[in-house]
Amino acid sequence: MKNISDIIEGYLKAIIEEGSKEQIEIKRSEIAEKFQCVPSQINYVINTRFTQDRGYLVESKRGGGGYIRILRVRAHTKADLIEHIIQTLENGASESVTEDIVFRLIDEDVISKREAKLILAALNRTTLAIPLPARDELRSRILCAMLLTLKYEKSEK
């Protein structure tokens, strides 16, 4: 069974996909009321499920007429997306950042769910059983190597 965060995420993504501009403007209190949860639950979903690494930009305006705007950002090509991700990995990659990147690669049809499972298994903290910050640096280097392989495989087709 899905938890409330998954349900809210699915609802917001469905609204974004329906729109032609790939963006939505919401009021946190209205969404919280719709799902009968506290507004902080909406904050949690937006802060964890709509990150830059997952391909979203979030803007917010506080106050009585406040809103939260969620914008879906897509690269022009899969190669451009991979190149952009590689540039963000220069300072290492935590496990949560890696998961966000992999989810985005699935969403953008760059990798399959099976490939995602393989990547996540290879890069999780139990597999890379070395202390931080070396673990994040190693994870980043391995992920970059995988992404470069994907980039050149995709451009050859």
Image (tube, helix red, strand yellow):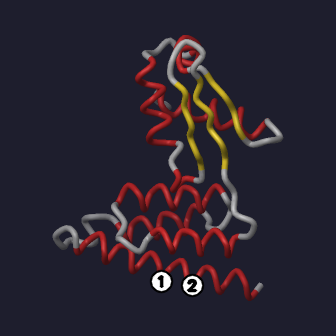
* Location of residue 130 by image quarter: bottom left
Q: Disc 2 vs disc 1: Cβ atoms closer than 8 Å? A: yes
Kind of residue indicated by mark 1 = Ala
Residue drawn 54% across the image and 77% down it = 147
Residue 84's place in the image compared with 74, above or below, is below
User: From the image, which quarter does the C terminus lie in?
Assistant: bottom right
Residue drawn at 64 percent across, 55 percent down:
107
Labelled disc at residue 145: 1
In the rendered image, the vertical position of residue 34 relative to residue 111, given as above or below: above
Residue corresponding to mark 2: 149
The x, y position of residue 93, in whole percent, is 37, 66
User: Hey, what amino acid is under mark 2?
Assistant: Thr
Residue 77 image-quadrant placement: bottom right
Mark 1 crowdedness (10 Å alpha carbons): few <14, some 14-19, many ≥20: few
Q: Nearer the viewer, residue 122 or 73?
A: 73
Mark 2 packing: few (<14 Cα in 10 Å), some, or many (20+)? few
Viewer-side residue, 119 vs 88:
88
Dot 2 lies on which element?
helix
Mark 2 to mark 1 CA distance (whole Å): 6 Å
In this image, 38 relative to 136: left or right?
right
Q: Residue at x 50, y 23 (%)?
A: 62
Q: How many marks?
A: 2
Marking on residue 98: none
Residue 139 locus on image (x, y percent) = 35, 73
Q: Where is residue 102 in the image (x, y as percent from the top left)?
A: 51, 61
Q: Say which residue appears at 27% left-offset and 64% top-offset.
A: 125
Most extreme residue toward the left is 131
The quarter of the picture where residue 121 lies is bottom left
Q: Is residue 86 above or below residue 55?
A: below
